[in-house]
Image (cartoon, rainbow, N blue to C red):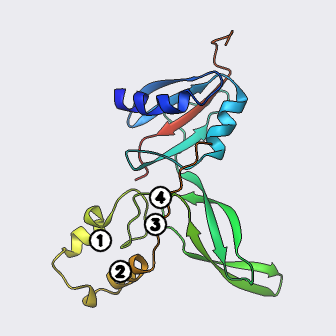
């Protein structure tokens, strides 16, 4: 907890009114912001990490229990390829399922194309199963098959190796008081599975 507070104190001096952090247990932390502008800065700076683990945020609504809310979605910036132009898009990713590298998209009711994505600030990504939150050495598929087995016998592993060969990691870091009563709460969990 102390390490988390020290780490986030770097964010606190970039806020106008500061933040307070409470440990709720179960890898959950409550972040309290004192003005709306500070919350917006954090949302725009998403995704955030702590020791290379993805932090999943959820803005609490009045009456929500911070221990009961689903922490499943993270917003990423991604480059979308597939048309003549390359587009920057903001995508909402469900951290419980494998990351999509392409998606069928409609231009009109009868015209489709496949958009390919390159995500910005992606951390702890497994090239074997496509999930966020662990690398190859902790992948359930890799551990089940055994690290000594050949990738030639397992198409999924070959696909993972091909993905890694063409992957360019992009870790772009942008760091973009009279009343101490918190008017808004924002919620985070330590690690995306």
Q: What is the spatial separation of the Cα atoms under label 2 and label 3, in whole angstroms?
A: 15 Å
Residue at the image position 48 percent from the left and 28 percent from the top:
9
Q: Is residue 165 above or below residue 171?
A: below
Q: Is residue 47 left or right of residue 148?
A: right
> Mark 2 or mark 4: which comes first in sequence?
4
Mark nearest the camera among 2 and 1 is 2
Can you name the residue that lies furthest to the bottom here? 152
The circle drawn on residue 141 is: 1
Q: Is residue 105 above or below residue 177?
A: below
Q: Quadrant of residue 139?
A: bottom left
Q: What is the spatial separation of the Cα atoms under label 2 and label 4, in whole angstroms?
A: 22 Å
Query: Under tag 3, what secondary structure?
Result: loop
Residue to which mark 2 is pinned: 161
Residue to which mark 4 is pinned: 96
Q: Nearer the viewer, residue 168 or 106?
A: 168
Q: What is the spatial separation of the Cα atoms under label 4 and label 1, in whole angstroms?
A: 15 Å
> Mark 2 or mark 1: which comes first in sequence?
1
Q: Is residue 36 left or right of residue 103?
A: right
Q: Quadrant of residue 126?
A: bottom left
Residue at the image position 29 percent from the left and 71 percent from the top:
141
Q: Is residue 51 above or below residue 184?
A: below
Q: What is the spatial separation of the Cα atoms under label 2 and label 1, in whole angstroms?
A: 14 Å
Using the rendered image of the protein, determine whether residue 1 is visible from the camera's viewpoint: no
Mark nearest the camera among 1 and 3 is 3
Residue to which mark 3 is pinned: 169
> Mark 4 or mark 1: which comes first in sequence?
4
> Mark 3 or mark 4: which comes first in sequence?
4
Query: Under tag 1, what secondary structure?
Result: helix
């Amino acid at each position: 907890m102390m390490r988390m507070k020290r780490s986030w104190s770097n964010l606190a001096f970039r806020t106008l009114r500061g933040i307070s952090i409470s440990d709720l247990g179960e890898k959950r932390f409550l972040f309290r912001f004192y003005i709306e502008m500070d919350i917006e800065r954090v949302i725009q700076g998403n995704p955030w990490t702590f020791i290379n683990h993805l932090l999943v945020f959820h803005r609490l609504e009045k009456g929500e229990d911070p221990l009961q809310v689903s922490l499943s979605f993270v917003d990423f910036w991604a480059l979308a390829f597939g048309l003549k132009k390359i587009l920057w898009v903001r995508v909402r990713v469900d951290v419980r399922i494998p990351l999509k590298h392409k998606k069928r998209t409609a231009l009109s009711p009868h015209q489709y194309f496949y958009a390919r994505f390159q995500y910005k600030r992606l951390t702890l990504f497994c090239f074997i199963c496509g999930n966020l939150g662990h690398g190859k050495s902790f992948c359930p598929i890799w551990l089940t098959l055994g690290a000594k087995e050949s990738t030639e016998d397992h198409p999924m592993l070959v696909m993972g190796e091909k993905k890694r060969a063409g992957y360019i990691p992009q870790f772009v870091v942008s760091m973009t008081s009279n009343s101490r009563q918190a008017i808004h709460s924002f919620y985070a969990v330590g690690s995306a599975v």
